[in-house]
Amino acid sequence: MSSPSWIAKMAGLRWFWALLVVIWAAVLWYLSSYSHPAMGPSFPLKDKLEHCLYFAAGSGAFLLALRGVRWMSLPFSQAAFTGMIFAGIVGAIDEFHQTFTPGRSGNDPWDWLADITGGCLAAALLRLVLKRWSRSAL
């Protein structure tokens, strides 16, 4: 399965991904500052899934900004570790920040674990997708 060449070009635009990381972090800060009621349907572990997916998006953008397409050449363990460290540091800061927001608890180790899981998930998915696309598009 081949991809359009624009996908490969977008994956290599480090400045674009760096900008997305900044936007992602600003939205995270806003959401953590907002005392909002739960929205949408509720189900068990919804909050953990939201943390995991949001941090997967941020970690994916971070990894692409850090290495671009060349990131694929890293050993998987190093790439996953990089995504995990990014998500862990930002997640810890976010959890601490939430302690100052009325109506939020913060410092939840399970939220932090979900953040780290998102970082690892981003590394795994990016590696799979970029390797597949780069074979035919680069």
Image (cartoon, grey):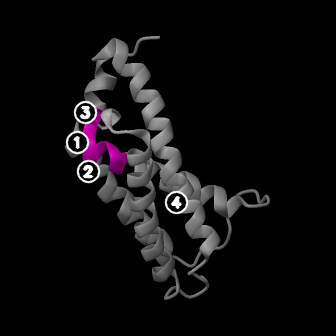
Cα separation between marks 3 and 4: 24 Å
Q: Which residue is mark 1?
A: 14
Q: Please give the name of the residue rendered at 25% of the width and 26% of the height, measured from the top-left corner.
A: 9
Q: Residues within 10 Å of mark 1 (few under 14, many from 20)?
A: some
Cα separation between marks 1 and 3: 6 Å
Q: Please give the name of the residue rendered at 68% of the width and 68% of the height, measured from the top-left corner.
A: 38
Residue 64 vs residue 75, the one in the foreground: 75
Amino acid at the residue labelled 3: Gly
Q: Residues within 10 Å of mark 4 (few under 14, many from 20)?
A: many
Residue 32 vs residue 127, the one in the foreground: 127
As drawn, the label of residue 116 is: 4
Assess whether mark 1 and mark 2 are in contact (beta carbons under 8 angstroms).
yes
Q: Is residue 3 above or below residue 100?
A: above
Residue 64, percent from left and from top: 32, 42
Q: Secondary structure at mark 3?
A: loop
Provide the residue span drawn in magenta. Answer: 61-70
Q: Main secondary structure of the magenta part?
A: helix
Judge depth for marks 3 and 4 and give the one in front.
4
Q: Which residue is mark 2?
A: 18
Residue 85, by quadrant, is bottom left
Q: Please give the name of the residue rendered at 52% of the width and 86% of the height, measured from the top-left corner.
A: 99
